[in-house]
Amino acid sequence: MSVFDRYLMRATLQGCGVMLMVLAALTLFVNFIGQSKYVGNGAYGLGDAFVFALLTLPSQIYQAMPIIALLGALIGLGGLAAHSELHVIRLSGASVWRLAGSVLMAGGVLMVLTGAFGEFIAPPLDQAARQFRTLKQHQKISIAGSNTSAWIKEGNDIISIDRMMSGGQVGGLYIYRFDDQRRLRSVIRADGARTNEEGDWFLENMRESRLSERGISTISAAMSASPGLLRPDLLELSAIDTDHLSARGLYEYYHYLRKNDLETSHYRQAFWTRIATTASVPLMLLLALPFVLGPMQRSGIGARLVAGIVIGMSYRLGSRSLYYSGDVFDLDPLLVGWGPVVLLAVLVTVGLSRVH
């Protein structure tokens, strides 16, 4: 690694570090303000709102990393271009592809950090934030479990859920009901359950065993209404939210669904999208290079930021639109996940080849 490789890497990563701190502070403030509607529910106060905003910050930063990379590269490399440092490096014999190689080294470092951040830091903190807020609002509730299962105690009921799914659905449900003297009165088993917009629950293939002094009686039904079984906000604590799972968690859950002959396309799509998000970070750094060597070589920092925000948000909106369209139109998960990244790679290649 040459001296100018290290110089370009340092400038690029410093620019990304500056943008990371700026956007983190702004996101934290917006998150905190957004929690004001929950303040006063139960024991949830202003301090708790700040803790929630802080815990959810890593997940939002991870999702915004491609935009942060683009803005950071425009600032770092744009500063070098504005002071003619990139021009001097090119006059020394370095081609635009040689510069791209140096920026790509910085992109590799940033991609590894982003991947580790999205795998090991953001998902557990996001899950902890949701549990923290709901338990503050409902202090009589006890919850334990993981991203795919849960034990929930509410009042005299203990509810065991084998599989948590999005869209207000669960699978493999057990309900243990006790009286005020903590004596077991009934056990309910259902193959699945779903909730409607009013919050009413419907148990599928329900079987209930009722215990009394006269013995045990059993009833069953293909579909049974159970109003007020569980509040939707409690269910959300352990629901499979693909936006907040790690790639490893998505992969494991996909294989679980496949093993049980369940629908897997949504989770395959989410898995590849998450991998592609991390892979897009180095490409975003490279995308800044044609701009700082071309039309924005002498532009101020304000113009570079505006251009970066427009490009970054366009990429974000486009990729998310394709993501949601994948479920609607049953698109191939690989196309949904990698389509935006391939298009970005084409734009980067064309942009670099046109730099003179």
Image (cartoon, rainbow, N blue to C red):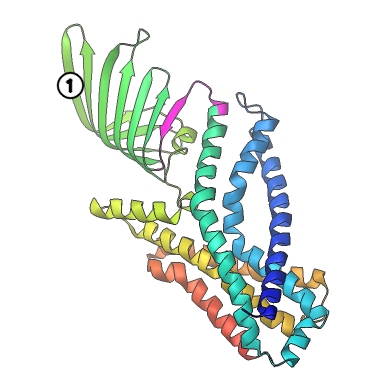
Given residues 76 and 43, the one toward you in this image is 76
Q: Describe residue 93's horizontal placement relative to residue 242 as left or right.
A: right
Q: Is residue 66 left or right of residue 21?
A: left
Image point (70%, 80%), residue name: 4
Question: Disc 1 on helix, strand or loop?
Answer: strand
Q: Which residue is mark 1?
A: 218
Looking at the image, residue 25 sits to the left or right of residue 166; the answer is right
Q: Is residue 331 visible?
A: no
Question: In x, y percent, where is residue 175?
Answer: 31, 26
Q: Is residue 56 visible?
A: yes
Tell me if residue 290 is in the magenta stretch: no
Q: Which residues are magenta?
A: 136-147
Magenta stretch contains residue 138: yes
Give residue 193's position: percent from left, percent from top.
33, 37
Q: Does residue 315 sit above or below 157 in this rendering?
A: below
Looking at the rendered image, the quarter that the N terminus falls into is bottom right
Residue 316 falls in image quadrant: bottom right
- Front residue of 212/250: it is 250
Vertical arrangement, residue 47 with respect to residue 321, above or below: above
In front of the other: 276 or 221: 276
- Residue at position x 73%, y 84% from top? 293
